[in-house]
Image (cartoon, rainbow, N blue to C red):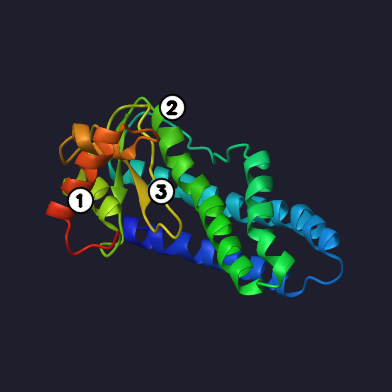
Amino acid sequence: MLSPAESRQALQLITANAVADSQELVRRLRGPMDRQKTTLLEVVPALIGYYSEGSSALAADFYELQRDQARVVAAFAAVPVVAERSEKVRRAILWAADPLEVGEVGVTFGRMAEVIQLETARPFRDTITGNRRRDPAAVGWRRISSGDGCKLCAMLADRGAVYKESTARFATHPACRCIAQPVFGTNETGEEASALQYVASSRSRTTAQRANLRTYLNDFFPDNSG
């Protein structure tokens, strides 16, 4: 049975393979710049789709294994969740390809890695949080971090906090190695996420909230990066 740590490692392997394939594609590009960008726009979304299927399937299996381990009696079938993001992916690919105009292939490697890693890891988290909303037995999800990540990830995972609000967002960043773990009423441990943790996971924050969050991160997580 895959543990949370093993599932996180498996997801890292999927995203690393996706990044390697994307960089090999960039390395093989030839011809006029318009043709190179067209190739990227044709091939990269399919590459992301292929690895997204893998990461979402991994998450669905992990969800059901966690459910079994929690001894949930009611039947439920977890389904892979892959959000429609074609336009956002298209814009991200063009952003990653821009440095090719001036011959900065290395910069494109870095940007493409950022795009691919984010997009292929996203379906794992979306599958956990999406099935949690569908599953009557689930009470929330918690963040499992690598333990050596940034201040924000450490803070969001602190105390094994359980995110119970159905609208809670899984905040992420480039090269983020955190995953979501479902929590059920039969194995619920840890306190609910604090108000500050909910604020930190939200997409929009006020200037005052950002300042308070930065102060908190620096005071309580000084040994983490970021």
Labelled disc at residue 226: none
**Mark 2 neighbour class, 10 Å CA radius: few under 14, some 14 to 19, many 20 or more:** some
Q: Is residue 213 left or right of residue 136?
A: left
Q: Nearer the viewer, residue 92 or 77?
A: 92
Q: Secondary structure at mark 1?
A: helix
Instruction: Specify the amino acid type for callout 3.
Output: Thr
In x, y percent, where is residue 14?
53, 62
Labelled disc at residue 217: 1
Disc nearer the start of the sequence (3/2)? 2
Instruction: Specify the amino acid type for callout 2.
Output: Arg
What residue is shown with label 2?
134
The residue under the point 67% across, 40% down is: 87
- Are the residues tagged 2 and 1 within 8 Å (C-beta)? no
Circle 2 or circle 1, nearest the eye: 1
Disc nearer the start of the sequence (2/1)? 2
In x, y percent, where is residue 68?
34, 43
Disc nearer the start of the sequence (1/3)? 3
Q: Using the image, determine if residue 218 lies above or below residue 125.
A: below
Q: Nearer the viewer, residue 194 or 126?
A: 194
The residue under the point 25% across, 62% down is: 147
- Are the residues tagged 1 and 3 within 8 Å (C-beta)? no
Q: Quadrant of the C terminus?
A: bottom left
In x, y percent, where is residue 90?
69, 47
Q: Is residue 141 left or right of residue 127?
A: left
Q: Is residue 10 left or right of residue 165?
A: right
Whole-angstrom CA distance, mark 3 to mark 2, is 22 Å
What residue is shown with label 3?
172
Q: Secondary structure at mark 2?
A: helix
Circle 1 or circle 3, nearest the eye: 1
Q: Is residue 179 left or right of residue 115?
A: left
Q: Secondary structure at mark 3?
A: loop
